[in-house]
Structure formats: structure tokens, C-alpha cells
Amino acid sequence: MTMGIGVEASDVSKTYGGKQALSGVGIGVKAGGIFAVLGPSGSGKSTLLRLLNLLERPDGGEIRFVDGGKSVHDGETMRRRMTLLLQRPVMLKNTVYGNVAYGLRLRGTDEREIEEKVRASLEQIGLEGFERRRASTLSGGEMQRVAFARAAVLRPELLLLDEFTANLDPPNIKMLEKAVKDYRESTGCTVILVSHNPFQAQRLAERCIFLLDGKVLGEGRIADVKETPDENVQAFFRGENV
């Protein structure tokens, strides 16, 4: 089993067009943990995830990745060790097999090994037998499951999920949540998920941070953050402020 990557952020800030999206945000995610970034729409969750995915740089503060107690400073190396799964999957104009195999081919993996890994990844997400289907013919839930298989087949040590089950039906949500838990248990990877769904966060994550208007209102065990006396936090966990 490969241990995941720890993530530490301190006093992180980000501004767009004069509007502050994040202000003084800090998190600590242990290697191998499942961590949720929570808050209502527009609170800065996805901005934080883009910074963690090295798609953008913070205007202030520091983000560190920790592997076996040592900081990893090489951004290019980290990009190969993490994968981001978006809310709306982007499918290549190809078969399901071609979509899942794409990243492995870019890395020069042997075709026989690709076939073995793709079939195992599709089986994990309940899509065995879909290899020859055109991705464009799939339902939204099936596309997201293919996107997960495409991410997981690369064996990332840090898996980033941005509202990865939003607008999906319960059966697909259940399959994807199980796939995340199974992947984490089998690989030891670290998972950071962004969600405005408090119930999903409680099903999957152990610890969380709660953001509102780019600022931290609570951090720690989900059960403890849930008891934060701020009414915005209370309303969120009641499912009223999402």
C-alpha cells in the first residue's frame, strides 16, 4: 500500500478582481485521511481546491505537501501524484476504454498493462462491459463514474473531489461514494473533497473545514465543527444554507 500525501496550508489568501475569495485560511490534512472543505455556494471552497491542485498560486500564505514527514517542493512531481475530479466530467470523443486508458498512455504504460488496469478500474465502479461504448452516449452518472475510473487508474496519492456527485441520482451517488472509500482503503491515498452537502461529508470524511465568505468558521472533527455555535454553520448542517 502506498501512503498518501499530507497537505498543510497556512494563512492562505486569494483575490480576484479586487474581491477576496480566501482570507487567512489554514488546513492540516494527514496522509491517508479523508478531509472535507465545506460551506455554502460562493464561500471559497473551489478556490481553495484549485490552489491545492496547483492550478493557481495563492496571493499570500503557504501550501505544503508532506511525504513521509518531508516537504515536497517540486510542483511538477506533485501534479503527477494527484488527480482532480470535477463536478462536470469532460469526456474525450472516444470509447469508455479510450477515456480511462488516456492518462496511462500519456505516461507510456505498456498496452497489456493498460488493458488490465482499465478493466479492473471499470469493474470497481460497476461499468464492466462498457469498454466499447462511446462516452458521448452515457448518462451523466455513468460519465462521472468513467471520470472516476480515469482518475483512479492513475493511482493518485492525493485525490481531489470538487462536488463530484452534484446533481446525480442516489444510485450513482452511492456507487461513487463507495468507490472513493474502497480506493482510499486499498491504496492509503489522501482524499480532499469539496462539498455543499453536509450529509455526504458526514458519510465520507473524518475531519473538515467550514468556510464562509472565504474565512474559516470551524475546523476539526466533523462532529465538533457541527456543534460550532455560529448560526451559519448550524443552518448548513441542517441542510438549510447550501
Image (cartoon, grey):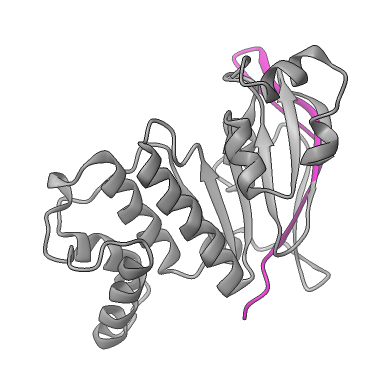
**Where is 238 relative to 56, above or below?**
above
Residue 202 vs 213, above or below: the answer is: below
Q: Residue at x 78, y 73 (%)?
A: 68
Q: Residue at x 71, y 58 (%)?
A: 33
In the image, residue 95 sits, relative to residue 154, either above or below, namely above
The quadrant of the image that shows the N terminus is bottom right
Question: Would you say residue 148 sits in the magenta stretch?
Answer: no
Q: Main secondary structure of the magenta part?
A: strand
Tell me, yes or no, whether the highlighted magenta stretch contains residue 20: yes
Is residue 107 left or right of 194 when viewed as pictured? left
- What is the x, y in percent for residue 49? 60, 40
On screen, residue 1 versus residue 133, left or right, reads: right
Res 239 visible? yes
Q: Is residue 102 left or right of residue 14?
A: left
Question: Residue at the spot x=39%, y=39% of the render?
Answer: 170
Q: Quadrant of residue 234?
A: top right
Identity of the residue drawn at 63% across and 15% down:
241
- Magenta region: 1-27
Residue 108 screen position, x and y as percent: 33, 78
Quadrant for residue 218, please give it.
top right
Q: Depth check: give the residue in front, 150 or 202.
A: 202
Residue 81 in sight: no
Residue 92 location (% of width, % of height): 22, 51
Quick check: 111 left or right of 22?
left
Above or below residue 155? Residue 144 is above
Count the numbered circles shown.
0
Q: Nearer the viewer, residue 148 or 107?
A: 148
Location of the C terminus by quadrant is: top right
Quadrant in the rendering for residue 128:
bottom left
Residue 4: image location, x then y, percent: 67, 67
